[in-house]
Structure formats: C-alpha cells, structure tokens
Amino acid sequence: MSITSSDLQARHDVRILGVVRTALAGHSGVPVEAIDPAKPLSAVPGIESVKALRAITEIEDECDVVIPDDFLFETATVAELAGFVADLVARSARA
Amino acid sequence: MTVELAQPEALVHAVGRFRTAPKDIARYDTGVDTAARALRATPDQVGRLAAAGLPHSRDTEGALLFDYDDLMNVGMFCGTGQTVPELGLRFLMRFAATARPSWFEPRSWEVGVHPARTAAGAPQGSAARLPEVSVRLPDDQAPGVELLDGQRLPDGPLAEGGYEIAVRLTGADRTVHDPAVRAVWDEVVNTLAARDVLYQTVPEALREDHHRAWGLGVADCVVASRLLTDMLLERGYQARARRGYLLGLFGSDHAWCEVFEDGVYKSLDPVFGFVSKLGDRTRGVAESPEFAEACFGGRFNRLLPCRTESAQPLVYFADAPAPYWAMAGVGARPRRTA
C-alpha cells in the first residue's frame, strides 16, 4: 500500500517528510522543491549510491532511528520513506 | 558536484591519528583533484594535508601527489561520518544490530561483480588505458553457499571480466569449543581492542607481509585474519584465511579465518569481533557483545566466500591486485521472491 503526502499530513508527520526531502536535496545538489515525494528515491536528480547513503545517514541521525537495510533495498518513493521513518519515530517514542 | 565538508579542517584532524604507508610500500600517484572527489572535499582542503604532514611527492609540474591508502585513512579518521570509508564501516556493520536469527537464516542474493576500471578517486593516468580485469570466483562448494537457477561457475579460482550470480547463503549459529583456540582469538581481538594495533586501511602490498603490518601496528581484516590463521597453524590446528564479499547496501570485500573443529570449518572473524565488541559511536556503529561472541565460530548469511584459502585479492588489474576503488563495481541486493 502506498503512502501519500496527505497520509503523512494526517499523521502530523510533515516534519519528517521535510527532513527526508532536505537530506536528499542536500546530498544530490538540487533544491528541495525538486524532490518529488511521489517519485522513487532512484528518480531523485543527481542521486547515486554513495550520495543516497549519505542522505540516509543524515535522516537517521536527525530522527534518531535506524532504517532497516531491507526497506532501503526496495524501490520506495520519497513519501514512503518518510512514512516509514515516521512510523519508526513513533514506535521509538512509545518504547 | 563537490560538496565542501562541514568543517574545513576536518581532514587535517585525521593526520596523526593513523599510521601512514611505509615509504617502500607507498605509491604517491593520486592527485589533488582525485583525492578531493574521493574525500568529498575541496582541493584546498586536500592541499592542507601536505602542510599538516601527510606524506606526499610532487609531479614534474610541482603538483601534489598522495598515496591512495593514506587518503582512505584520512577519510576513515576525519570524523565527518560522510566519507566513503566511514560510510562503509557504518553500513557494513548494520546487520550486527539486527535480531540474532537474521544473521544465520537462509537468505538469497543477486550479486553482480563488475569491478570499476576507472572511478571517481582513481589515481591519475589510470583512465588512459583500461586495465584487463580478472576476478576471484565464489566458492560454490563451501558449506552454506548454494547457487540458484542451476547456475554453474567455471573451474579455477579466477575468471576474466566479472560475473552475476543468484546465490542462497545459509549461516550457521555455532561456536568454537577449544579453549586454546579461544586464547589465540582473545590475543588478536584484545590487541585490536586495546589499539595496540590500529584497525585501518592497509595497502595490499603490506597485506602480503601481514606479520610486518602487525609489527608496524596496523591491521585490517586481511592482516588480522592471516595472522590469526598463522597462529593457529603454528599450534597445529587446521586453519585457513578466507576472503569474499560482505553483501549489503555497501558492497565490500572482507576477510576472516576458519578453523577446523567437530568435522567442519568454523568461522573466526577478528575484525567484526573487535568492532562489534567496542562499537564506534562516532561512525554510527553500535556495540553488540552478542554479535562479537557470534564472530567466534558463527557463519553469517551475508558473507560470500571466494576461492582462496589465504585471503588472496578478489580483483586483479592485469596481474596486480586492483586498487580499492575497483569495488565500486560490486553490488548485491536481496533476491525478490514471487
């Protein structure tokens, strides 16, 4: 099931989406506006594996979570990644 | 696009925190621009390394040239968390933080080995003529290694070019029972943990003389595994140094030791053992005593052994071991199931 931006907003997780987009933009060298939440990570302009891993580390450090490798291997969209991170943050807060 | 490091002096802070390549081993053939790309830094930041004491030479036009392995150690020890060596360690050890059963359960992978013949960070001049590549083939006869789809590999240890395989790796949750083996293991791991020998990148030429490397106070997975193997052989044990690929988001080669006990070879991984024993918070590596203990006998489902019993290199350019950056052409991902 895909997760859309509106789903994220409903869960008050827009901040997480912002963190994700900012990290991806910063490491791929494009403006934040160029990061389309509906597109796969692989479609981020200028992204390649090492830059993507740098972005992931920034997201993890910012949100204090570890994103499982198995999720990162899948072709997720930017919004799905943000939703997944938001769930990790929520679970971490409940623990 | 070159992105400047957050701290302009970050690279310089690494100088003195590792041991540079011995003069008779070092190859000063990596220019400033190449180094800047490899370290995600500006040429000016790289230039400051020479002033800070990083060994170098100059070409005929006076431009700085550095040793590539020294530069990798600058990346490893600069503390930004963003250089390729730092990312490598962080991502390679992530699976240690997962649940114990996930270390051993059968796991299917699609593996592509097509070593880069040029890359960002390649030493100057290497792009002029592309080298002939040969690669070490996976040890498909090793326990826990099963090629899928009826694939077959050629005979012999090496093949030209590269390969793609689908493979299922099955780990083994076990330990070594012999206390004398434990004593040798403790000696190596504790020496690394005490920093009496520094874990860092070691040039392949120095890896070939692993006793010299250890004596100089430097080790990586190849050095530590070969040394542990020698120590076990000297004590009469049947042991061998293995080398293969650690499969994951950040592909890399890795070496470990195996000792024969109870009718099977059991893995001894001194570098994983010491890294997970201590953890490395600055590089995002959590400590895991349970994983450290599993490195003493356990076989992991992310290690694909290749055909060598002395941890020989996995990739060659012509007849010489390929540089570190050739690993950029190695990739793996979990196999999708229908």
Image (cartoon, rainbow, N blue to C red):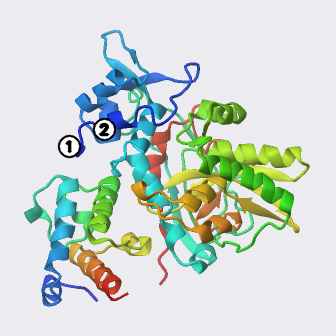
Disc ID at residue A69:
none
Q: Position of residue A44 (x, y in %)?
A: 21, 62
Dot 2: element:
helix
Tell me which chain the residue with mark 2 is part of: B
Q: Is residue A4 above or below residue B333?
A: below
Q: Is residue B209 above or below residue B136?
A: above
For residue B179, side relative to residue B318 (left or right): right
Q: Is residue A15 visible?
A: yes
For residue A8, side relative to residue B275 (left or right): left
Q: Are marks 2 and 1 in contact (CB under 8 Å)?
A: no
Query: What type is the residue that disc 2 sits on?
Result: Arg
For residue B134, side relative to residue A85 (left or right): right
**Picture quadrant where residue A38 is located:** bottom left
Dot 1: element:
loop
Residue under label 2, please give it. B37
Q: Is residue B157 visible?
A: no
Residue under label 1, please give it. B1
Q: Residue at x 41, y 73 (%)?
A: A68
In whole angstroms, how far apart are the C-alphas of marks 2 and 1? 9 Å
Labels 2 and 1: the sequence-earlier one: 1
